[in-house]
Image (tube, helix red, strand yellow):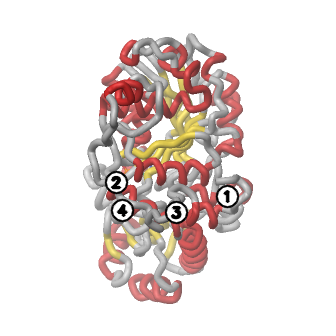
Amino acid sequence: MSKQYEKETICIQAGWKPKNGEPRVLPIYQSTTFKYDSSEQMGRLFDLEESGFFYSRLQNPTNEYVASKICELEGGVAAMLTSSGQAATYYAVFNICEAGDHVVLSSTVYGGTFNLLTCTMKKMGITCTVVDPDADEETLHEAFTDNTKCVFAEAIANPALVVLDIGKFARVAHAHHVPLIIDNTFATPINCNPFTWGADIVTHSTSKYMDGHAMAVGGCIVDSGNFDWSEYPEKFPGLCTPDESYHGITYTEKFGKAAYITKATSQLMRDLGSIQSPQNAFLLNIGLETLPLRMERHCFNAQKTAEFLEAHEKVAWVNYPGLPGNRYYELAKQYMPKGTCGVISFGLKGGRQAAAEMMDKLKLAAIVTHVADARTCVLHPASHTHRQMNDEQLEKAGVAPDLIRLSVGLEHINDIIADLEQALA
Ligand SMILES: *Cc1c(COP(=O)(O)O)cnc(C)c1O
């Protein structure tokens, strides 16, 4: 679809475009495999000489149509769906890193990302240096080694709500000839397009706002096509030298700007197999259709809720980048002028104990582990996800003992505030 369309239009019209007499709605291609008339045709597909579908572990039409919609929303050149956000993060990094390589990682990334990179991938020989996202450029430069292959950070950190200076991170990454990978889950492409600020690869947990209804776990990787791997062939041998498992194909030579996603699909997906089911891709596509409407309302409701909490006598502090006093207010205005996301964190004057008591009194907001869907929900990390830690350990992990994470949903704002009001009382 032509790039002149606005995001609202892309969300509805991009991806599946039926021809004469075809279904109006994206079909679910519930098929593991695809039929061909000649053995030679099939052979050419296996050699990556022709594009086409042959087995759903590698590619499936439903998934491809949904990936292409997200690709257009981000302004990229190629995209793929994965079974989860975790798989997207893993593939995005592992596609250009191997044993002996190194990643520069923002300290405030999602806990699952932190574990994956600092523990699990360490066992595969890939190490990390963790950096403060607010550090100045000089300090960030010090984190790089000769083997650094990428920088990974979140546009808005879950749950710290740190807004990243994407331009700063892109400059530093590019000075070291490596790409910047941005997890854009919380901002979504509706509120932020990291590629316009210099990011090279974007990842998503589509399980959050994109799906928007807490129906299906999924992920996505989008390539901007802007990073020229072939300029640094010794740094990125996987993309710039022949792949023995594909009869000596060199991805950058054969696929140009699509090299990164083609390698991730035809090599990582083939061997590791974290595919999204076509059924889940279908649900994701329904979510995407209303994403701009929902993000607008999530941000409106969160802003009103944050203002209410900030003015409440029992509330000790509120963290929401849309509040003028917030540390990230200016960065949010620059990178996300339409709004940030629907997630707020706050603490009560009564601390950890008061947090648990207040949450038990909520009637509308449910206590769940998920965030970023239509229903307002809360989580108290000190009592739930981080409950094995004492207060001192919590502070070290950047999670205040009294921190309540509130994911503001799409209910009427008056009802959301009334629920908080009665629970606080
Ligand atoms: C939830 C989340 C992930 C992990 O995604 P899953 O779909 O749960 O695997 C990654 N990054 C961010 C920012 C998230 O919020």
Q: Which quarter of the picture shows residue 11?
A: bottom right
Mark nearer the N terminus (1 vs 4): 1
Nearest the eye: 109 or 339 = 339
Mark nearer the N terminus (4 vs 2): 2
Q: How far separated are the C-alphas under marks 4 and 3?
A: 41 Å
- Which dot, 2 or 1, sits closer to the camera? 2
Q: Position of residue 260 (x, y in %)?
A: 52, 30
Could you say whether the residue bearing mark 4 is in a helix, strand or loop? loop
Q: How far separated are the C-alphas under marks 2 and 3?
A: 19 Å
**Residue linked to disc 1:** 336
- Sort mark 2 into few (<14), some (14-19) or many (20+) by Cα contacts within 10 Å: some
**Residue linked to disc 4:** 370
Q: Position of residue 372 (x, y in %)?
A: 45, 64
Mark 4: is the Cβ under 8 angstroms from ligand 1? no
Q: Amino acid at mark 3?
A: Asn
Q: Position of residue 224 (x, y in %)?
A: 62, 39
**Residue linked to disc 2:** 29
Q: Amino acid at mark 1?
A: Met
Could you say whether the residue bearing mark 1 is in a helix, strand or loop? loop
Q: How far separated are the C-alphas under marks 4 and 2?
A: 29 Å
**Residue linked to disc 3:** 20
Q: In screen coordinates, is 372 left or right of 197?
A: left
Q: How far separated are the C-alphas under marks 1 and 4?
A: 23 Å
